[in-house]
Amino acid sequence: MSNINSLERFKIIQPYLNDIVTLTSISRDTGISIRNLHRWVKQYHENGLDGLQTKSRNDKGIYRTISKDLEKAIEGLALQKPRRSVASIHRQIIRHAEDNNLPIPGYAVVSKIIKNISPDLVVLAHEGIKHYQQKYELLYIRETVRPNQIWQADHTLLDILVLDGKGSVKRPWLTIIMDDYSRAIAGYYLSFNAPSSLQTSLAFRQAIWIKNESQWGICGIPEIMYTDHGSDFTSYHIEEVCASLKIQLIFSTIGKPRGRGKVERFFATINQRLLQDLPGYIQKNVSVKQHECLSLETFELKLKSFILDDYNNKPHGTTQVSPILRWQNNHFLPNLPEHKELLDLLLLTVAKPRRIHRDGIKFQGFRYFSTTLAGYVGEDVIIRYDPRDLAEIRVFYKNNFLCCAISQDLEAKTVSLKEIVQARTARRKELRNNIRERTSIIDALLKNPEKISENETMELFPEQQIKTPQANIRRYRDE
Protein backbone atom coordinates (compact mmCIF):
# COMPACT_ATOMS: atom_id res chain seq x y z
CA MET A 1 0.00 0.00 0.00
CA SER A 2 3.03 2.30 0.11
CA ASN A 3 2.43 3.35 -3.49
CA ILE A 4 -1.01 4.80 -2.68
CA ASN A 5 -0.94 8.53 -1.89
CA SER A 6 -2.92 10.19 0.89
CA LEU A 7 -5.77 11.45 -1.31
CA GLU A 8 -6.25 8.00 -2.86
CA ARG A 9 -6.42 6.48 0.63
CA PHE A 10 -8.97 9.10 1.61
CA LYS A 11 -11.13 8.26 -1.41
CA ILE A 12 -11.05 4.58 -0.42
CA ILE A 13 -12.37 5.21 3.12
CA GLN A 14 -14.60 8.19 2.19
CA PRO A 15 -17.78 6.04 1.67
CA TYR A 16 -17.32 4.68 5.20
CA LEU A 17 -16.72 8.15 6.66
CA ASN A 18 -19.96 9.24 4.99
CA ASP A 19 -21.88 6.26 6.48
CA ILE A 20 -22.63 4.82 3.05
CA VAL A 21 -20.81 1.46 3.19
CA THR A 22 -19.01 -0.68 5.77
CA LEU A 23 -15.30 -1.22 5.99
CA THR A 24 -15.91 -4.89 5.24
CA SER A 25 -17.49 -3.95 1.92
CA ILE A 26 -14.58 -1.65 1.10
CA SER A 27 -12.12 -4.36 2.03
CA ARG A 28 -13.88 -6.87 -0.17
CA ASP A 29 -13.92 -4.54 -3.17
CA THR A 30 -10.36 -3.24 -2.84
CA GLY A 31 -8.47 -6.19 -1.35
CA ILE A 32 -7.17 -3.93 1.44
CA SER A 33 -7.24 -5.52 4.89
CA ILE A 34 -9.85 -4.28 7.31
CA ARG A 35 -7.05 -3.69 9.84
CA ASN A 36 -5.41 -1.24 7.46
CA LEU A 37 -8.73 0.47 6.78
CA HIS A 38 -9.41 0.90 10.50
CA ARG A 39 -5.93 2.38 10.91
CA TRP A 40 -6.47 4.79 8.02
CA VAL A 41 -9.78 5.95 9.53
CA LYS A 42 -8.10 6.53 12.90
CA GLN A 43 -5.19 8.40 11.30
CA TYR A 44 -7.58 10.59 9.29
CA HIS A 45 -9.64 11.49 12.38
CA GLU A 46 -6.48 12.36 14.31
CA ASN A 47 -4.39 14.17 11.68
CA GLY A 48 -6.59 14.76 8.65
CA LEU A 49 -5.19 14.16 5.17
CA ASP A 50 -1.60 14.37 6.47
CA GLY A 51 -2.21 11.37 8.70
CA LEU A 52 -2.82 9.20 5.66
CA GLN A 53 0.68 9.76 4.34
CA THR A 54 2.18 7.25 6.78
CA LYS A 55 3.40 3.95 5.45
CA SER A 56 0.80 1.24 5.78
CA ARG A 57 1.00 -2.53 6.19
CA ASN A 58 -0.10 -5.12 3.66
CA ASP A 59 -2.26 -7.34 5.87
CA LYS A 60 -4.92 -9.03 3.81
CA GLY A 61 -7.88 -11.22 4.56
CA ILE A 62 -10.91 -10.59 6.68
CA TYR A 63 -12.05 -13.97 7.89
CA ARG A 64 -9.01 -16.22 7.86
CA THR A 65 -10.95 -19.43 8.57
CA ILE A 66 -12.88 -19.30 5.29
CA SER A 67 -12.05 -18.61 1.66
CA LYS A 68 -13.02 -15.52 -0.30
CA ASP A 69 -15.30 -17.63 -2.51
CA LEU A 70 -17.18 -18.99 0.49
CA GLU A 71 -17.53 -15.47 1.90
CA LYS A 72 -19.00 -14.25 -1.39
CA ALA A 73 -21.36 -17.25 -1.44
CA ILE A 74 -22.68 -16.30 2.00
CA GLU A 75 -23.26 -12.70 0.86
CA GLY A 76 -24.91 -13.89 -2.35
CA LEU A 77 -27.38 -16.05 -0.41
CA ALA A 78 -28.13 -13.12 1.93
CA LEU A 79 -28.96 -10.88 -1.04
CA GLN A 80 -31.39 -13.33 -2.66
CA LYS A 81 -35.11 -12.65 -2.81
CA PRO A 82 -37.07 -13.49 -0.78
CA ARG A 83 -34.91 -12.66 2.22
CA ARG A 84 -33.52 -15.72 3.97
CA SER A 85 -32.75 -16.23 7.67
CA VAL A 86 -29.18 -16.57 8.94
CA ALA A 87 -29.92 -20.14 10.08
CA SER A 88 -31.11 -21.14 6.61
CA ILE A 89 -28.00 -19.65 4.98
CA HIS A 90 -25.75 -21.34 7.57
CA ARG A 91 -27.27 -24.77 6.91
CA GLN A 92 -26.74 -24.42 3.16
CA ILE A 93 -23.13 -23.27 3.65
CA ILE A 94 -22.46 -26.30 5.89
CA ARG A 95 -23.70 -28.66 3.14
CA HIS A 96 -21.57 -26.86 0.56
CA ALA A 97 -18.46 -27.04 2.80
CA GLU A 98 -18.94 -30.74 3.53
CA ASP A 99 -19.40 -31.58 -0.16
CA ASN A 100 -16.19 -29.77 -1.08
CA ASN A 101 -14.02 -30.70 1.95
CA LEU A 102 -13.83 -27.08 3.12
CA PRO A 103 -13.55 -25.79 6.71
CA ILE A 104 -17.05 -25.34 8.11
CA PRO A 105 -17.65 -21.77 9.31
CA GLY A 106 -19.46 -21.27 12.58
CA TYR A 107 -22.87 -19.63 12.89
CA ALA A 108 -21.33 -16.49 14.41
CA VAL A 109 -18.96 -16.05 11.43
CA VAL A 110 -21.81 -16.40 8.92
CA SER A 111 -23.95 -13.98 10.92
CA LYS A 112 -21.13 -11.42 11.08
CA ILE A 113 -20.53 -11.59 7.33
CA ILE A 114 -24.23 -11.02 6.63
CA LYS A 115 -24.42 -8.17 9.16
CA ASN A 116 -21.47 -6.40 7.54
CA ILE A 117 -22.99 -6.33 4.05
CA SER A 118 -23.35 -2.71 2.93
CA PRO A 119 -26.86 -1.46 3.86
CA ASP A 120 -27.38 0.26 0.50
CA LEU A 121 -26.59 -3.04 -1.24
CA VAL A 122 -29.18 -4.85 0.90
CA VAL A 123 -31.86 -2.23 0.15
CA LEU A 124 -31.14 -2.36 -3.58
CA ALA A 125 -31.26 -6.17 -3.64
CA HIS A 126 -34.39 -6.65 -1.50
CA GLU A 127 -36.44 -3.48 -2.02
CA GLY A 128 -35.55 -2.31 -5.54
CA ILE A 129 -34.19 0.79 -7.22
CA LYS A 130 -36.95 3.23 -6.12
CA HIS A 131 -36.49 2.52 -2.42
CA TYR A 132 -32.74 2.73 -2.87
CA GLN A 133 -32.99 6.17 -4.52
CA GLN A 134 -35.37 7.49 -1.88
CA LYS A 135 -33.29 6.24 1.02
CA TYR A 136 -29.76 6.93 -0.20
CA GLU A 137 -29.73 9.28 -3.20
CA LEU A 138 -31.96 11.76 -1.33
CA LEU A 139 -30.14 11.28 1.96
CA TYR A 140 -28.08 14.45 1.73
CA ILE A 141 -30.63 16.85 0.33
CA ARG A 142 -33.07 16.68 3.21
CA GLU A 143 -33.73 19.84 5.20
CA THR A 144 -30.70 20.75 7.26
CA VAL A 145 -31.06 21.37 10.98
CA ARG A 146 -28.16 23.73 11.72
CA PRO A 147 -25.90 26.33 10.06
CA ASN A 148 -22.79 25.14 8.21
CA GLN A 149 -24.16 21.60 8.01
CA ILE A 150 -24.41 21.77 4.21
CA TRP A 151 -23.10 24.42 1.83
CA GLN A 152 -24.04 24.53 -1.83
CA ALA A 153 -21.85 25.92 -4.61
CA ASP A 154 -22.86 26.85 -8.14
CA HIS A 155 -22.20 29.21 -11.06
CA THR A 156 -24.43 31.17 -13.41
CA LEU A 157 -23.95 33.44 -16.42
CA LEU A 158 -25.73 36.64 -15.41
CA ASP A 159 -28.35 38.27 -17.67
CA ILE A 160 -26.54 41.58 -17.85
CA LEU A 161 -23.88 43.15 -20.07
CA VAL A 162 -21.05 45.04 -18.37
CA LEU A 163 -17.89 46.69 -19.67
CA ASP A 164 -14.56 44.89 -19.53
CA GLY A 165 -11.16 46.58 -19.36
CA LYS A 166 -11.04 47.07 -23.14
CA GLY A 167 -14.42 48.78 -23.40
CA SER A 168 -16.26 45.74 -24.79
CA VAL A 169 -19.50 44.48 -23.27
CA LYS A 170 -19.68 40.95 -21.88
CA ARG A 171 -21.85 38.84 -19.59
CA PRO A 172 -20.08 38.07 -16.28
CA TRP A 173 -20.07 34.73 -14.45
CA LEU A 174 -21.12 34.61 -10.80
CA THR A 175 -19.95 31.87 -8.42
CA ILE A 176 -21.74 31.65 -5.06
CA ILE A 177 -21.44 29.61 -1.86
CA MET A 178 -24.76 29.30 0.01
CA ASP A 179 -25.46 27.97 3.49
CA ASP A 180 -28.30 25.48 2.99
CA TYR A 181 -29.89 25.98 6.42
CA SER A 182 -30.09 29.77 6.50
CA ARG A 183 -29.99 30.46 2.71
CA ALA A 184 -27.30 33.05 3.49
CA ILE A 185 -24.60 33.77 0.92
CA ALA A 186 -21.27 32.92 2.56
CA GLY A 187 -19.03 33.87 -0.36
CA TYR A 188 -19.03 34.79 -4.05
CA TYR A 189 -16.74 35.53 -6.98
CA LEU A 190 -17.47 37.60 -10.10
CA SER A 191 -15.47 37.22 -13.31
CA PHE A 192 -15.65 37.28 -17.10
CA ASN A 193 -13.86 33.93 -17.19
CA ALA A 194 -15.79 30.68 -17.52
CA PRO A 195 -16.13 28.63 -14.29
CA SER A 196 -12.91 27.02 -13.11
CA SER A 197 -11.36 25.70 -9.92
CA LEU A 198 -9.79 29.15 -9.44
CA GLN A 199 -13.14 30.94 -9.17
CA THR A 200 -14.51 28.20 -6.92
CA SER A 201 -11.43 28.30 -4.68
CA LEU A 202 -11.52 32.06 -4.22
CA ALA A 203 -15.25 32.05 -3.43
CA PHE A 204 -14.71 29.14 -1.04
CA ARG A 205 -11.86 30.92 0.73
CA GLN A 206 -13.95 34.04 1.18
CA ALA A 207 -16.86 31.96 2.50
CA ILE A 208 -14.79 30.13 5.12
CA TRP A 209 -12.74 32.97 6.58
CA ILE A 210 -13.88 35.85 8.80
CA LYS A 211 -15.06 38.85 6.73
CA ASN A 212 -14.00 42.46 7.21
CA GLU A 213 -17.62 43.60 6.94
CA SER A 214 -19.36 43.54 10.33
CA GLN A 215 -22.75 42.70 8.81
CA TRP A 216 -21.33 39.62 7.05
CA GLY A 217 -20.69 37.28 9.97
CA ILE A 218 -21.03 34.00 8.06
CA CYS A 219 -17.84 31.93 8.22
CA GLY A 220 -16.48 28.53 9.17
CA ILE A 221 -15.80 25.12 7.60
CA PRO A 222 -18.95 23.31 6.47
CA GLU A 223 -19.59 19.64 7.20
CA ILE A 224 -20.77 18.92 3.64
CA MET A 225 -20.22 20.64 0.30
CA TYR A 226 -22.96 19.83 -2.21
CA THR A 227 -22.27 20.66 -5.86
CA ASP A 228 -22.98 19.56 -9.40
CA HIS A 229 -20.65 17.58 -11.66
CA GLY A 230 -18.93 20.60 -13.23
CA SER A 231 -15.26 20.11 -14.09
CA ASP A 232 -14.27 22.85 -11.64
CA PHE A 233 -15.95 21.07 -8.73
CA THR A 234 -14.62 17.63 -9.69
CA SER A 235 -11.05 18.90 -10.06
CA TYR A 236 -8.23 17.29 -8.08
CA HIS A 237 -7.56 20.58 -6.31
CA ILE A 238 -11.10 20.93 -4.92
CA GLU A 239 -11.12 17.29 -3.81
CA GLU A 240 -7.81 17.80 -2.02
CA VAL A 241 -9.09 20.95 -0.29
CA CYS A 242 -12.23 19.20 0.98
CA ALA A 243 -10.24 16.18 2.19
CA SER A 244 -7.73 18.39 4.02
CA LEU A 245 -10.45 20.43 5.72
CA LYS A 246 -12.50 17.26 6.49
CA ILE A 247 -15.40 18.41 4.32
CA GLN A 248 -17.62 15.74 2.79
CA LEU A 249 -17.87 16.50 -0.93
CA ILE A 250 -21.14 15.30 -2.50
CA PHE A 251 -22.12 15.65 -6.15
CA SER A 252 -25.70 15.78 -7.38
CA THR A 253 -26.69 12.96 -9.72
CA ILE A 254 -26.02 13.73 -13.38
CA GLY A 255 -29.37 14.56 -14.95
CA LYS A 256 -31.04 14.61 -11.51
CA PRO A 257 -29.92 17.82 -9.78
CA ARG A 258 -32.04 17.25 -6.66
CA GLY A 259 -31.80 19.86 -3.94
CA ARG A 260 -30.41 22.56 -6.23
CA GLY A 261 -33.61 24.63 -6.12
CA LYS A 262 -32.42 26.93 -3.32
CA VAL A 263 -29.45 28.12 -5.36
CA GLU A 264 -31.58 28.48 -8.49
CA ARG A 265 -34.08 30.60 -6.55
CA PHE A 266 -31.27 32.89 -5.42
CA PHE A 267 -30.16 33.41 -9.02
CA ALA A 268 -33.78 34.22 -9.92
CA THR A 269 -33.88 36.69 -7.01
CA ILE A 270 -30.83 38.50 -8.37
CA ASN A 271 -32.59 38.90 -11.70
CA GLN A 272 -35.80 40.22 -10.18
CA ARG A 273 -34.46 42.46 -7.44
CA LEU A 274 -31.16 43.69 -8.85
CA LEU A 275 -30.38 43.14 -12.54
CA GLN A 276 -33.74 44.30 -13.93
CA ASP A 277 -33.15 47.79 -12.55
CA LEU A 278 -29.62 48.19 -13.90
CA PRO A 279 -28.47 49.40 -17.33
CA GLY A 280 -27.29 46.56 -19.54
CA TYR A 281 -29.96 44.09 -18.38
CA ILE A 282 -30.68 41.62 -21.19
CA GLN A 283 -34.31 41.47 -22.33
CA LYS A 284 -35.98 40.03 -25.39
CA ASN A 285 -36.38 42.47 -28.28
CA VAL A 286 -34.62 45.23 -26.32
CA SER A 287 -31.21 46.44 -27.51
CA VAL A 288 -28.55 47.32 -24.96
CA LYS A 289 -26.75 50.65 -25.33
CA GLN A 290 -23.08 50.06 -24.75
CA HIS A 291 -22.33 53.55 -23.43
CA GLU A 292 -24.89 53.05 -20.63
CA CYS A 293 -23.39 49.78 -19.35
CA LEU A 294 -21.64 49.65 -16.00
CA SER A 295 -18.01 48.67 -15.55
CA LEU A 296 -17.34 45.33 -13.86
CA GLU A 297 -16.00 47.10 -10.78
CA THR A 298 -19.09 49.31 -10.42
CA PHE A 299 -21.41 46.35 -10.98
CA GLU A 300 -19.56 44.29 -8.34
CA LEU A 301 -20.07 47.06 -5.78
CA LYS A 302 -23.81 46.99 -6.47
CA LEU A 303 -23.87 43.18 -6.30
CA LYS A 304 -22.02 43.13 -2.97
CA SER A 305 -24.34 45.78 -1.54
CA PHE A 306 -27.36 43.74 -2.68
CA ILE A 307 -26.07 40.54 -1.04
CA LEU A 308 -25.06 42.12 2.26
CA ASP A 309 -27.69 44.82 2.75
CA ASP A 310 -30.67 43.40 0.90
CA TYR A 311 -30.73 39.64 0.42
CA ASN A 312 -28.91 38.49 3.59
CA ASN A 313 -30.82 40.94 5.79
CA LYS A 314 -34.41 40.65 4.54
CA PRO A 315 -36.86 37.87 5.54
CA HIS A 316 -36.62 34.86 3.23
CA GLY A 317 -39.84 33.74 1.54
CA THR A 318 -39.54 30.16 2.82
CA THR A 319 -38.07 30.56 6.32
CA GLN A 320 -39.75 33.94 7.04
CA VAL A 321 -36.49 34.96 8.72
CA SER A 322 -33.58 36.89 7.25
CA PRO A 323 -30.72 34.56 6.24
CA ILE A 324 -28.16 36.30 8.46
CA LEU A 325 -30.47 36.17 11.51
CA ARG A 326 -31.29 32.49 10.94
CA TRP A 327 -27.55 31.73 10.70
CA GLN A 328 -26.80 33.63 13.94
CA ASN A 329 -29.77 32.45 16.02
CA ASN A 330 -28.20 29.08 16.83
CA HIS A 331 -25.41 30.74 18.84
CA PHE A 332 -22.89 28.17 17.67
CA LEU A 333 -19.15 28.56 17.25
CA PRO A 334 -18.16 28.01 13.62
CA ASN A 335 -15.33 25.61 12.95
CA LEU A 336 -12.45 27.70 11.59
CA PRO A 337 -9.03 26.65 10.28
CA GLU A 338 -6.21 26.80 12.82
CA HIS A 339 -4.70 29.74 10.95
CA LYS A 340 -5.47 31.71 7.82
CA GLU A 341 -2.22 30.70 6.13
CA LEU A 342 -3.41 27.08 5.94
CA LEU A 343 -6.49 28.28 4.08
CA ASP A 344 -4.33 30.41 1.78
CA LEU A 345 -2.14 27.46 0.85
CA LEU A 346 -5.16 25.31 0.08
CA LEU A 347 -7.37 27.78 -1.72
CA LEU A 348 -5.18 30.39 -3.38
CA THR A 349 -4.46 28.50 -6.59
CA VAL A 350 -2.90 31.57 -8.21
CA ALA A 351 0.69 30.58 -7.44
CA LYS A 352 3.78 32.11 -9.05
CA PRO A 353 7.47 31.26 -8.55
CA ARG A 354 9.66 34.22 -7.61
CA ARG A 355 13.16 34.89 -6.27
CA ILE A 356 13.81 37.08 -3.23
CA HIS A 357 16.12 40.02 -3.93
CA ARG A 358 17.70 42.46 -1.52
CA ASP A 359 14.87 44.94 -2.09
CA GLY A 360 12.13 42.33 -1.84
CA ILE A 361 10.00 40.52 -4.42
CA LYS A 362 9.05 42.05 -7.77
CA PHE A 363 5.58 41.18 -9.06
CA GLN A 364 3.25 42.89 -11.56
CA GLY A 365 5.54 45.94 -11.64
CA PHE A 366 5.46 46.45 -7.86
CA ARG A 367 7.92 45.70 -5.09
CA TYR A 368 6.75 43.66 -2.11
CA PHE A 369 8.69 43.71 1.13
CA SER A 370 8.69 42.16 4.59
CA THR A 371 11.47 42.12 7.19
CA THR A 372 11.15 38.32 7.28
CA LEU A 373 12.52 38.17 3.73
CA ALA A 374 15.92 39.44 4.90
CA GLY A 375 17.02 35.94 5.85
CA TYR A 376 16.00 34.45 2.51
CA VAL A 377 17.69 36.70 -0.05
CA GLY A 378 18.54 34.66 -3.15
CA GLU A 379 16.04 31.89 -2.33
CA ASP A 380 13.28 30.79 -4.70
CA VAL A 381 9.77 30.97 -3.24
CA ILE A 382 6.15 30.59 -4.28
CA ILE A 383 3.84 33.57 -3.93
CA ARG A 384 0.07 33.26 -3.73
CA TYR A 385 -2.39 36.10 -4.05
CA ASP A 386 -6.01 37.03 -4.46
CA PRO A 387 -6.54 38.68 -7.88
CA ARG A 388 -9.12 40.95 -6.24
CA ASP A 389 -6.50 42.59 -4.00
CA LEU A 390 -2.84 42.91 -4.97
CA ALA A 391 -1.85 45.10 -2.01
CA GLU A 392 -0.59 41.98 -0.24
CA ILE A 393 0.94 38.68 -1.35
CA ARG A 394 1.62 35.55 0.70
CA VAL A 395 5.06 33.99 0.47
CA PHE A 396 5.65 30.23 0.84
CA TYR A 397 9.08 28.64 1.18
CA LYS A 398 9.28 24.89 0.56
CA ASN A 399 5.47 24.64 0.90
CA ASN A 400 5.52 26.34 4.32
CA PHE A 401 4.06 29.78 4.93
CA LEU A 402 6.84 32.33 5.35
CA CYS A 403 5.23 35.76 5.60
CA CYS A 404 2.89 38.32 4.07
CA ALA A 405 4.67 40.90 1.91
CA ILE A 406 3.23 44.36 1.34
CA SER A 407 3.59 46.73 -1.60
CA GLN A 408 4.13 50.27 -0.28
CA ASP A 409 2.63 51.66 -3.49
CA LEU A 410 -0.63 49.79 -2.87
CA GLU A 411 -0.71 49.78 0.92
CA ALA A 412 -4.05 50.85 2.46
CA LYS A 413 -5.66 50.37 -0.95
CA THR A 414 -7.59 47.55 -2.51
CA VAL A 415 -6.26 47.32 -6.05
CA SER A 416 -7.32 44.40 -8.19
CA LEU A 417 -5.40 42.80 -11.02
CA LYS A 418 -8.15 43.98 -13.39
CA GLU A 419 -7.57 47.61 -12.38
CA ILE A 420 -3.82 47.31 -12.93
CA VAL A 421 -4.35 45.74 -16.36
CA GLN A 422 -6.83 48.52 -17.26
CA ALA A 423 -4.36 51.20 -16.17
CA ARG A 424 -1.64 49.64 -18.29
CA THR A 425 -4.02 49.37 -21.26
CA ALA A 426 -5.01 53.03 -20.91
CA ARG A 427 -1.34 54.09 -20.76
CA ARG A 428 -0.47 52.04 -23.85
CA LYS A 429 -3.42 53.61 -25.68
CA GLU A 430 -2.23 57.10 -24.73
CA LEU A 431 1.28 56.33 -25.98
CA ARG A 432 -0.06 54.90 -29.26
CA ASN A 433 -2.08 58.08 -29.83
CA ASN A 434 1.04 60.16 -29.28
CA ILE A 435 2.94 58.01 -31.76
CA ARG A 436 0.14 58.35 -34.34
CA GLU A 437 0.13 62.14 -33.92
CA ARG A 438 3.86 62.43 -34.50
CA THR A 439 3.80 59.90 -37.32
CA SER A 440 1.14 61.88 -39.16
CA ILE A 441 3.39 64.95 -39.03
CA ILE A 442 6.28 63.00 -40.53
CA ASP A 443 3.95 61.58 -43.19
CA ALA A 444 2.92 65.11 -44.13
CA LEU A 445 6.55 66.18 -44.42
CA LEU A 446 7.60 63.22 -46.51
CA LYS A 447 4.59 63.28 -48.83
CA ASN A 448 5.76 66.37 -50.84
CA PRO A 449 8.87 67.68 -49.13
CA GLU A 450 9.77 70.07 -52.02
CA LYS A 451 6.40 71.85 -51.83
CA ILE A 452 6.40 72.57 -48.11
CA SER A 453 7.00 76.27 -47.58
CA GLU A 454 8.64 77.93 -44.64
CA ASN A 455 5.26 79.02 -43.27
CA GLU A 456 3.89 75.44 -43.51
CA THR A 457 6.93 74.12 -41.69
CA MET A 458 6.42 76.67 -38.92
CA GLU A 459 2.79 75.55 -38.62
CA LEU A 460 3.90 71.94 -38.24
CA PHE A 461 6.59 72.84 -35.72
CA PRO A 462 5.43 76.10 -34.10
CA GLU A 463 7.90 75.73 -31.26
CA GLN A 464 10.86 75.75 -33.67
CA GLN A 465 11.92 78.89 -35.57
CA ILE A 466 13.75 78.30 -38.85
CA LYS A 467 16.85 80.45 -38.93
CA THR A 468 18.82 81.41 -42.05
CA PRO A 469 22.41 80.28 -41.60
CA GLN A 470 24.97 83.08 -41.51
CA ALA A 471 27.58 83.15 -44.25
CA ASN A 472 31.13 82.46 -43.15
CA ILE A 473 32.78 83.89 -46.30
CA ARG A 474 34.43 87.29 -45.80
CA ARG A 475 33.74 89.59 -48.73
CA TYR A 476 35.96 92.53 -47.69
CA ARG A 477 39.32 92.85 -46.09
CA ASP A 478 37.92 94.78 -43.07
CA GLU A 479 35.35 92.17 -42.19
Image (cartoon, rainbow, N blue to C red):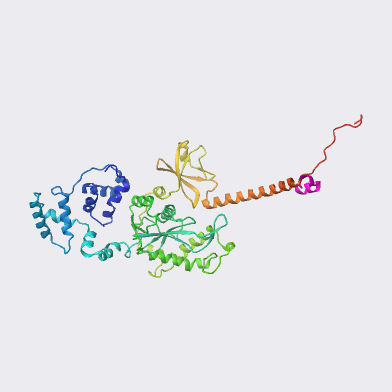
The image shows residue 183 at horizontal and vertical percentages of: 39, 64
Pick whichever, 78 or 18, lies toward us: 78
- Is residue 351 inside the magenta stretch? no
Pick the quarter of the image with the C terminus: top right
Magenta run includes residue 451: yes
Left or right of residue 365, residue 225 in this image: left
Res. 187 in view: yes
* Residue 415 visible in the shown view: no
At 29% from the left and 53% from the top, the residue drawn is: 14
The one of 27 and 343 positioned closer to us in this rendering: 27
Q: Is residue 73 left or right of residue 198?
A: left
Tell me what residue is drawn at x 21 percent, y 52 percent. 24
Q: In the shown orientation, is residue 312 left or right of residue 63? A: right
Q: Locate residue 184 relative to residue 66 in the image: left or right.
A: right
Give x and y (percent) for residue 185.
42, 61
Residue 130: x %, y % from top left: 26, 66
Magenta: main secondary structure: helix
Farthest residue, direction top? 477
The magenta segment is 449-462
